Image (cartoon, helix red, strand yellow):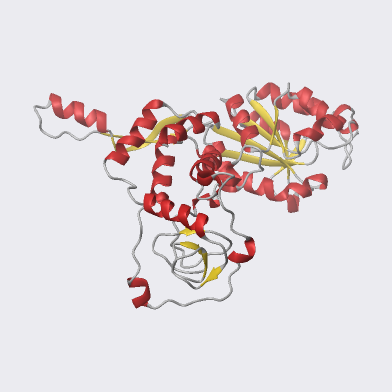
Amino acid sequence: MLIEFFYLLRRGGLKVSLTEFLTLLEALKQGLARYSINEFYYLSRSALVKDEALYDRFDQVFAAHFKGIEQVFGPQGAEIPDEWLRQQFDRVFSDEEMALMEAMDWDELMETLRKRLEEQKEEHHGGNKWIGTGGTSPFGSGGYNPAGIRIGPGGGQRSGVKVWDKREYRNLDDSLELGTRNLKVALRRLRKFARQGAAEELDLPGTIDSTARNAGFLDLKMVPERHNAIKVLLFLDVGGSMDDHVRACEELFSAAKTEFKHLEYFYFHNCVYEGVWKDNRRRHTEKTPLMDVLHKYAHDYKLILVGDATMSPFEITYAGGSVEHLNEAPGATWLKRLLDTYPKAIWLNPEPQKRWDYTPSVRLINELMEERMFPLTISGLEQGMRELL
């Protein structure tokens, strides 16, 4: 069964190595996750999955391989009609009733379920043997058993052993838009660690080496804590069509502030021009000249522009084309100045990528960015982080 599981994972796109699989087998040999499918799920995920972004893919393969009904018994197995599994009443179990029940191990549980599926001919509620609701049978819903398989909607005492296919990490799929937590996972790919500040972290290799050279007498060595030395300039488009993407931009901003110690941010509208700002409430009175930004922040900053790039093409290509003011130079001129100063630069677009070719301004911006525009999805952000390294 586990050999087949290993090959299913590889066919499902998870690059599980033989070493990782042997580690899982060794953990099982040592008695971990002996009687619980939940424990086996977390153990196998820890041993076999190297990237949080693949949790959802792992959950799907796990569910397909270890499914209690559909996969174990196949299409020839008996089916339980939905109406049999509709809960008729809420039953409260006493401590004495719960104490009388014994949990079966996994093999016994699955063999018993197989027999019940073959034998059961009608619905049951409140019993202790058949598949139903509100009872003490290991199979069904709305009842109680210390180690049962939940079949049907709803939960009982939250003790079922097969609730892992809930797939809590499904929002980590590459094709989905990002939440704050997922953004942090993707942004962490942009890292360059350096040790700065006071020596307050234990240098374990240095301590071992120094102690060995000191005839075994302990000689502690300390080093400065490691910090992410990457410096980021974040430019965020606001207003107009970007109102549809406020939440995504807020989540990106929040995640970036957490992940990057050296982060500077500015706002712009549609395209960058001669002035940017820090406070949207004072954007008409407290603008920062873009030339000041170019002179203040060194060229080793990584530049990230965020916007849907949806505007009139005149805003990009013509002086005076801006919808808000009479710009003396086209947006393309200012964008080129940014890219000349910060060669490591990307543009993140929250609009679905399939729409880009139908919007002339998006194509123009992407050309100016030298095809370094990426969608605001996990896979898009990961591609962007690789481009910035």
Image quadrant in which the C terminus is located = top right
Left or right of residue 362: residue 168 = left
Left or right of residue 271: residue 102 = left
The picture places residue 271, in percent across and down from the top left corner, at 79, 35
The picture places residue 11, in percent across and down from the top left corner, at 54, 29
The picture places residue 292, in percent across and down from the top left corner, at 68, 33
- In front: 302, or 179? 179
Where is residue 221, by image quadrant? top left
- In front: 25, or 325? 25
Q: Is residue 92 visible?
A: yes
95 w.r.t. 287: above or below: below
Image quadrant in which the N terminus is located = top left
Q: Is residue 285 visible?
A: no
Left or right of residue 169: residue 243 = right
- In front: 199, or 255? 255
Residue that extends furthest to the left in the rendered view of this protein: 215
151 w.r.t. 4: above or below: below
The picture places residue 171, in percent across and down from the top left corner, at 60, 46
Residue at left offset 73%, top offset 24%: 369
